[in-house]
Amino acid sequence: MLELTGALLALAAGAGFAGALSGLGGGAFLVPALVVLVGLPMQAAIGASLLAVVATSAGASVAFVRDGWTNLRVAIVLECATVTGAIAGAWLAGMVSPALLEALFALVMLQSAYFSMRKRDSDVLPASDRLCERLELGGEFPGDSGEPVRYGVSNLPGGSAIMVLAGVMSGLLGIGSGALKVIAMDQVMGLPLKVSSATSNFMIGVTAGAGALVFLSRGDVVPMVAAPVALGVTAGAIAGSKLLPYADVRWLRAGFVVILVLVAAEMGWRAFGGV
Amino acid sequence: MPVDPEEERILRLWTPVLLRVILVAAVVLMALGTGLTLFVARDHVDPATFRHPVSVRVPLLTVLSEGIRGNANAIATLGLMVLTLVPLVRVALCFLLFLKERSGIFAAFTAYVLAGLIAGILLGRIG
């Protein structure tokens, strides 16, 4: 018992640390660690991971909101899509086979690896389209010179469609789906990258919370698994965020891409009968 | 759009304070539950449930009363429940903010998100 709890705490701390350094959040590393290394069933790992994502996102987003990077209006509009998707995903997670969940997880890991490698620019849309203008979704962020920089927002329906998918993946796989959320805002809706990241950070906890509430009220969370996991991930994420300013991001990113591809291969192998 | 003073006050003061209080309460309960299981009440948890968990729906009042009696598993469950208050409170504060701004459409969006979170609890109960 002591060994198992110790292993859960250590693995969760490692996942939280890696999640904070890579910017992908703890769930991407936590679920495969719990399934492959501890031998937990996929559903139990997902329930524990969703609660861990809620715990880690609680602290991080406060700073971004305070510093003026989060677009609260965009977050709330898009949360309508992610929460709907997350509830559907968490509900489905209780029904679909573990093999399908593992196959999906492998695909999402590959998408995250691709997202981590991609070169990103940060264009600012000068004006919003008609719908976003009407909803006053445009905003401003603190520029380098201290002067606020205004930006517009476009293609709300396209962004919302991807957000439904991000929500389904979050509830189904126990991850924050941050990579998909940033793609929706940055690439599809034209928000500046840092605003997209901060807004995604704000949204992740609410999306994961929707899925976690389904798992918790269904009784699919084992408290003696989920509690040490949430504690470990939170501690790891705090340590990771403290170390991040001193880390060489280029090498870190390359290392995490390799890990994500290996995780995808392992989960894909398990899904197609390897284990 | 520029952040107005009311939004500033709610975001800067209330959100961080409330979220931190909830998070600390959740962490204390989870740590207490885990610690009690490991060092005091090992018989409260069957180690087999780690690898072969079964769905157990326990009414909130039972969890509360068991937690007050010092049941380690119930205390950890209470910690997890308190943790799920973080997103609920965050969205509720946004709802309050949009109501104060008299922004009807955003208050409606926020109410939808809140309703979605509550629907998640009900869906879990029946599904």
Image: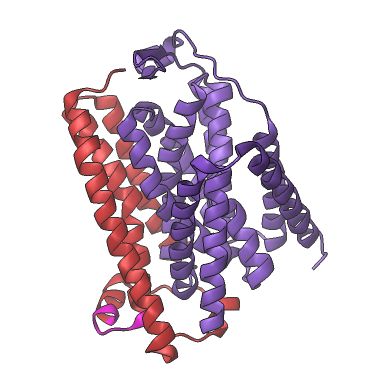
Chain colours: A purple, B red
Q: If the image is split into quadrants, where does the C terminus of chain A sit? A: bottom right
Specify the quadrant of the image occupied by residue A213.
Answer: bottom left
Q: Left or right: A54 with respect to B2? A: right
Coordinates of residue A65 in the picture (x, y in percent): 33, 34
Where does the magenta region start and end?
Answer: B66-72
Is residue A207 visible in the rendered image? The answer is yes
Q: Is residue A274 above or below residue A147?
A: below
Coordinates of residue A100 in the picture (x, y in percent): 71, 56
Is A136 contained in the magenta span? no
Coordinates of residue B14 in the picture (x, y in percent): 20, 42
Residue lying at 28% horizontally and 18% vertically, measured from the top left = B2
Residue lying at 61% horizontally and 66% vertically, measured from the top left = A34
Coordinates of residue B37 in the picture (x, y in percent): 41, 83
Residue lying at 43% horizontally and 33% vertically, measured from the top left = A199
Is B70 contained in the magenta span? yes
Q: Left or right: A191 with respect to B8? A: right
Specify the quadrant of the image occupied by residue A118.
Answer: top right
